[in-house]
Amino acid sequence: MKLKTRFLATLAALPALAFALASCSAVGVLNGITPSSSFDRDKNVSYGDLDRQRMDIYRAATPRPDAPVMVFVHGGSWSEGDKNIYKFLAEGFTKEGYHVVVPNYRLYPEGRYPDMVVDTGLAARAAAELFSGQPVVLVGHSAGGYNVLMAAMAPDVSGLKTCSTVAGVISLAAPTGAYPMKDAPFTTIFPGRLEGDDAPLNRVDGPLPPMMLVNGLDDTTVGPKNAEALAAKLEAAGLRVESKLYEGMNHTDAVRVLSRHFDGGSPLKGDMLSFLAGLPTGPDYCAR
């Protein structure tokens, strides 16, 4: 027990990049000490024909009645990251009765805008079909947060019938277009540099489901201005949005604290569960 406690303290202190990398042994140990009793997992379920169009399905052992399916999309600057390292996150919600789907998507250099949005839409549609037409809640961190925002806000790109499929969206430390892209490889991944219709900020032009926008005030990778600017624009359009800014939270804390081993250190997970509990029940999830 003392060894486990020391490990968790060490993991909590890891720099953001080390925690995020799929090769990080600390994340592997965290997954190893995360129990599997709250779910049954189906790995590498296809939602398309390409190699990265695969997802893991975590079916809650004791599902919450009428709950939406959570589709969590990983971060990694659209050039790295993998579904395989997120057991710790999925278990944090399957133990609350939510089915969780974790897809991969095309990454740079093979994948460039709008491929990540197309793949997120395909995965969300596949999840809704797998769970008998249940609505989905799109959740994403960092690059994945961008993906889920755009999947819901740009149905012309994602192919999603947003108002009849997506009950809500939670973006964790997501780029929204508050800052233009200036550096490689982002200027290649996004030729529009998040200054046009490739930016969530420029997609507030139609009915949308409720959104929860999260940033840490200590996030120096994707600053809080991203959530603040998008929330202000959604509010001005009369759309339902919750903006949550957390003191002392850095970029990867937004996913770390969703593990059962760290959720006592932040109100984020409880706020997410409250948001989920208050979502509309349909059939029109965009109804105000």
Image: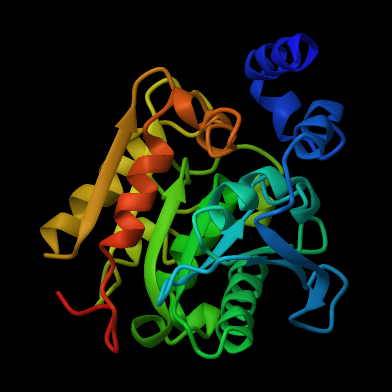
Residue 186 at least partly seen: yes
Residue 29, placed above or below residue 248: below
Here the colouring is rainbow
| Image point (42%, 50%), residue name | 176
Viewer-proximal residue, 80 or 99? 99
Viewer-proximal residue, 270 or 247? 270
Q: Position of residue 117 (x, y in %)?
A: 58, 69
Specify whether 60 is left or right of 87. left
Q: The C terminus is located in which quarter?
A: bottom left
Q: Give residue 31's quadrant in the image.
A: top right
Q: The N terminus is located in which quarter?
A: top right
Q: Position of residue 74 (x, y in %)?
A: 65, 51
Specify whether 164 is left or right of 13. left
Viewer-proximal residue, 180 or 269? 269
| Image point (74%, 65%), residue name | 40
Q: Position of residue 137 (x, y in %)?
A: 45, 67
| Image point (55%, 83%), residue name | 128
